Image (spheres, rainbow, N blue to C red):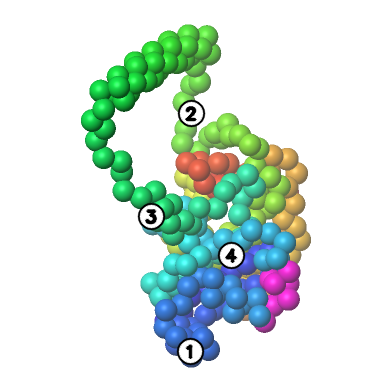
């Protein structure tokens, strides 16, 4: 039972074996924090990266989203021959592992019991009345503001969605790096990082799979380099099963769709 861990920022692509990892750590309840510690022990680059940036593990869920996992989550369920990414957390986000939510809930203590004092009840009624008036005022203000803002027309699912804050260059470049790190072996996961438009450009799933079955390796040989807020240039080396290879320059358009960064189009340059 294996798990492929990819960290493009540290240049790591390592396949973990569950039995070997359990023997190395002398226990079976292994968490993602244990995995990072074990990998960093043999990689000075990853060790330096983890000390300077906030990292997180992400797996590709059934809907194609890169979903973060909690540091104390058990790794055992992920040893199914799949792939998981170790990345810098997106800028401007706050890591909220699932165990943190539990801890906060436990510290709140039991809810307060009913208040029987008439004076306290009157104060509560006044407070509720003030709150209701405040809510009504807020709703009226929101309606007034909404009426003065021009409506946005809805486009196709793969059209760019205005987002704030702006997507950083490193995040755009990582989309391309992560995509090609999956190929040619894991076309299922790579396909999930493409929009419908990009899939059509690729000729559909059958042609896509057939193309990558004819390759022994695929890698980014130059770049990737973000040239604006949604465009990335990179040179890709395609190596055929017979050993012949070619370096081909491409330009990629990256969009944010449903909270995910996806490749929306690609073309040779």
Nearer to me, 81 or 165? 165
Q: Earlier in the sequence, mark 2 or mark 3?
A: 3
Q: Mark 3 points at which residue?
A: 106
Alpha-carbon distance for marks 3 and 1? 31 Å
**Disc 4 and disc 3: Cα gap in Å?**
30 Å
- Disc 1 marks which residue? 26
Residue wearing tag 4? 86
Q: Which numbered disc, 3 or 1, marks the residue that appears first in the sequence?
A: 1
Mark 4 surroundings: few (<14), some (14-19) or many (≥20) residues within 10 A: many
Q: Which of marks 2 and 3 is in front?
A: 3
Residue 75 in the image: above or below residue 126: below
Residue 257 in the figure: left or right of residue 116: right
- Magenta region: 42-48
Look at the image and say whether residue 100 sits in the magenta stretch: no
**Front label number (3 vs 1):** 3
Sequence-wise, the earlier of marks 1 and 2 is 1
- The residue identified by callout 2 is 155
| Element marked by disc 3 | helix
Quarter holding residue 178: bottom right
């Amino acid at each position: 039972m294996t798990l492929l861990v990819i960290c493009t920022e540290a240049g790591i692509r390592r396949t973990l074996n569950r039995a070997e990892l359990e023997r190395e750590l002398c226990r079976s309840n292994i968490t993602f924090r244990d995995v990072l510690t074990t990998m960093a022990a043999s990689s000075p680059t990853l060790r330096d990266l983890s000390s300077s940036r906030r990292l997180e593990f992400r797996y590709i869920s059934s809907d194609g989203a890169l979903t973060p996992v909690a540091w104390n989550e058990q790794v055992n369920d992920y040893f199914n021959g799949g792939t998981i990414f170790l990345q810098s957390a997106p800028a401007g986000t706050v890591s909220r592992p699932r165990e943190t939510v539990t801890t906060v809930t436990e510290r709140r203590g039991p809810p307060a019991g009913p208040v029987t004092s008439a004076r306290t009840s009157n104060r509560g009624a006044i407070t509720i009345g003030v709150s209701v008036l405040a809510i009504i005022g807020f709703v009226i203000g929101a309606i007034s503001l909404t009426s003065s803002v021009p409506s946005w027309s809805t486009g196709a699912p793969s059209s760019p969605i205005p987002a704030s804050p702006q997507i950083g260059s490193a995040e755009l470049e990582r989309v391309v790096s992560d995509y090609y790190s999956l190929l040619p072996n894991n076309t299922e996961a790579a396909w999930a990082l493409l929009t419908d438009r990009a899939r059509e450009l690729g000729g559909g799933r059958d042609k896509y799979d057939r193309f990558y079955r004819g390759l022994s390796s695929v890698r980014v040989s130059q770049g990737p380099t973000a040239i604006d807020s949604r465009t990335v240039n990179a040179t890709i080396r395609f190596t055929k099963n017979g050993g012949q290879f070619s370096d081909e320059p491409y330009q990629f358009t990256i969009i944010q769709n449903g909270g995910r960064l996806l490749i929306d189009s690609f073309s040779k340059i």
